[in-house]
Image (cartoon, rainbow, N blue to C red):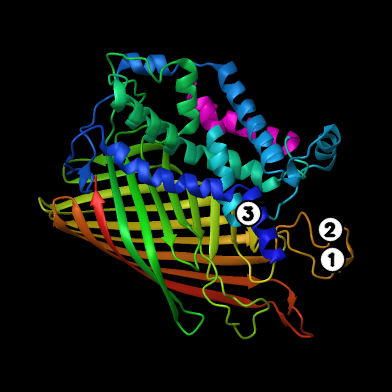
């Protein structure tokens, strides 16, 4: 029981509950909030079902007003958030890491950065989400995408060096600002769609509340500046109303763990998908004028609540072909990927150092590359579009079969990835989507297994990336949507996760006298989704 309570305490201290509650709240609010600002219209050019509202360009007065920079206010919000979060951790949660002093700060600068051992969800999602708040302190005070990234870097550096008695984290100083920019820009633009300065009363309060939930730092800035209740003749949106499609899917999910005699588990599932902007727009240098966003949640005893987050944000693009029948564009894109699963069974797998009972874990909070988008109208009722991306993964993490320290069971890594996708629309009834994400990740700073870590003061390795290894990770997904009534669709989804990790040294089997030389271990998991999808 004491071990269970200790794990729960650490869980609460690291803030994962707060982030997961926020995720659930945002998923409830976001689709309905975006739906509130316009009537749906048919979407012909984008090969999606519907647009949330009729596209409207931004008002020049709104753009000029919202692009006025307020450096000191943005800086104060960044610093103030860090101090407020530290005070909560120190005096409410009494987290051991929040007991700071001048000596701990001095020691942080003296020791320098090292790799940390927090949960995948903490390092790959919670920290980037915190980075999105720093980022939106700048974005909400008139700064552009690139300038706001500096606030994310500054806020992250302040926290790492000053606000914790733990040594500053190498992975956090990368994942927090870079992943924070991806999440932050998505939330900032989503909140922009909700706001309408022409409204008053209960309708205005509802919009402001929804915008605050979606982008808390922007909501706070609007309260501080008085914009939250100021009535104007224009909407007050920085980007007007771009083309946007939102879908919400609710249903069941069944998982089949291929490495354990095809053991099956089932539960509830929820998914939200957003496509913002025109993927085939003319040449642009405005980051995130187009992006796609996918988030999935599980209601399954053996699985984490948050199982998937994918963001693809266009940084710049050039249109090569743009006709009524055909379109082709190329550009640079930022990617944020998060895939998480958990133990399905405790049944050991023969010949594995640690039983491979977790199918996969992967995060790439810092990834960028080139991509191409293609569309073709076969006939007035049949069309398809496709995409391909090749990316450099600056920072990633992938499940380890061997490394177990504190909360970490994954290896820090870098490498590359490829993404492919094909969407086919058959009239207004049937849509079929096929996509495949492939990742190749390398961990170059491996754990030293020749050291007896039990004799060290920490009782375990510190400042290591994990096991010296390289891994393939692949996610293949097939999805079909059939229209039942108006904007309600029946959805059938099939997905397959595959991981193969090659280790580069002799590995000892825990509690045994034998080991295995340079093992290669793989795991598979298949999933079936049966859902109802509503397109807003």
Q: Are marks 2 and 1 in contact (CB under 8 Å)?
A: yes
In magenta, the rendered stretch is 134-162
Which mark's residue is nearer the viewer, 3 or 1?
3
Q: Residues within 10 Å of mark 2 (few under 14, many from 20)?
A: few
Q: Earlier in the sequence, mark 2 or mark 3?
A: 3
Residue with the most extreme front position: 1
Q: Earlier in the sequence, mark 3 or mark 1?
A: 3
Looking at the image, which residue is at 34% across and 49% down?
Answer: 273
Residue 236 rendering spot, x and y as whole percentages: 34, 20
Which mark's residue is nearer the viewer, 2 or 3?
3
Q: How many labels were placed on the picture?
A: 3
The residue beneath circle 2 is 458
The residue beneath circle 1 is 453
Q: Are marks 2 and 3 in contact (CB under 8 Å)?
A: no
The residue beneath circle 3 is 11
Looking at the image, which residue is at 68% across and 71% down?
Answer: 402
Nearer-the-camera pick, 505 or 206? 206
Q: CA distance from mark 2 to mark 3?
A: 21 Å
Numbered disc 3: secondary structure: helix
In the image, is residue 161 part of the stretch drawn in magenta? yes
Is the residue 76 above or below the residue 124 in the image? above
Residue 220 rendering spot, x and y as whole percentages: 49, 26
Which quadrant holds the C terminus? top left
Residue 527 rendering spot, x and y as whole percentages: 39, 70
């Amino acid at each position: 029981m004491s071990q269970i309570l200790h794990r729960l305490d650490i869980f609460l201290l690291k803030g994962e509950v707060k982030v997961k509650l926020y995720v659930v709240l945002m998923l409830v609010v976001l689709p309905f909030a975006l739906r509130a600002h316009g009537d749906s219209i048919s979407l012909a050019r984008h090969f999606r079902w519907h647009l949330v509202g009729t596209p409207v360009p931004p008002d020049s007065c709104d753009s000029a007003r919202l692009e006025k920079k307020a450096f000191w206010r943005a800086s104060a919000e960044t610093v103030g958030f860090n101090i407020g979060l530290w005070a909560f951790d120190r005096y409410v949660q009494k987290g051991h890491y929040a007991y700071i002093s001048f000596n701990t700060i001095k020691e942080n600068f003296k020791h320098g950065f090292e790799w940390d051992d927090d949960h995948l969800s903490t390092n790959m999602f919670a920290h980037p989400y915190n980075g999105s708040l720093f980022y939106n302190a700048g974005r909400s005070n008139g700064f552009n995408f690139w300038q706001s990234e500096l606030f994310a870097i500054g806020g992250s550096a302040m926290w790492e060096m000053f606000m914790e008695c733990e040594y500053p984290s190498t992975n956090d100083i990368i994942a927090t600002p870079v992943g924070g920019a991806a999440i932050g820009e998505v939330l900032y633009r989503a909140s922009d769609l909700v706001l309408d300065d022409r409204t008053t009363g209960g309708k205005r309060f509802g919009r402001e509340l929804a915008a605050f939930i979606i982008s808390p730092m922007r909501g706070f800035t609007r309260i501080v500046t008085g914009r939250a209740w100021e009535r104007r003749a224009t909407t007050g949106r920085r980007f007007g109303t771009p083309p946007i499609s939102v879908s919400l899917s609710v249903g069941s999910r069944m998982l089949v763990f291929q490495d354990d005699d095809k053991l099956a588990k089932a539960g509830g599932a929820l998914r939200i998908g957003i496509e913002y902007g025109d993927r085939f727009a003319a040449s642009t240098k405005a980051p995130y004028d187009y992006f796609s966003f996918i988030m999935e949640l599980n209601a399954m005893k053996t699985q984490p609540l948050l199982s998937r987050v994918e963001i693809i944000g266009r940084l710049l693009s050039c249109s090569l072909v743009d006709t009524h029948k055909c379109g082709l564009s190329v550009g640079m894109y930022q990617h944020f990927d998060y895939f998480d699963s958990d133990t399905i069974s405790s049944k050991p797998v023969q010949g594995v150092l640690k039983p491979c009972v977790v199918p996969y874990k992967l995060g790439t909070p810092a990834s960028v590359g080139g991509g191409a988008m293609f569309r073709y109208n076969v006939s007035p009722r049949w069309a398809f579009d496709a995409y391909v991306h090749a990316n450099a993964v600056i920072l990633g993490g992938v499940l380890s079969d061997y490394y177990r320290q504190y909360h970490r069971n994954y290896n820090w890594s870098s490498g590359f990835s490829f993404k492919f996708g094909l969407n086919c629309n058959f009239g207004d009834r049937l849509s079929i989507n096929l996509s495949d994400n492939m990742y190749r990740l390398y961990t170059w700073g491996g754990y030293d297994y020749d050291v007896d870590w039990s004799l060290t003061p920490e009782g375990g390795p510190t400042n290591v990336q994990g096991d010296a290894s390289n891994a393939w990770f692949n996610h293949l997904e097939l999805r079909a949507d059939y229209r039942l009534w108006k904007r309600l669709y029946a959805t059938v989804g099939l997905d397959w996760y595959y991981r193969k990790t090659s280790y580069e040294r002799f590995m000892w089997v825990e509690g045994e006298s034998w080991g295995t030389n340079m093992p290669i271990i793989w795991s598979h998991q298949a999933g079936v989704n049966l859902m109802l999808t509503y397109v807003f």
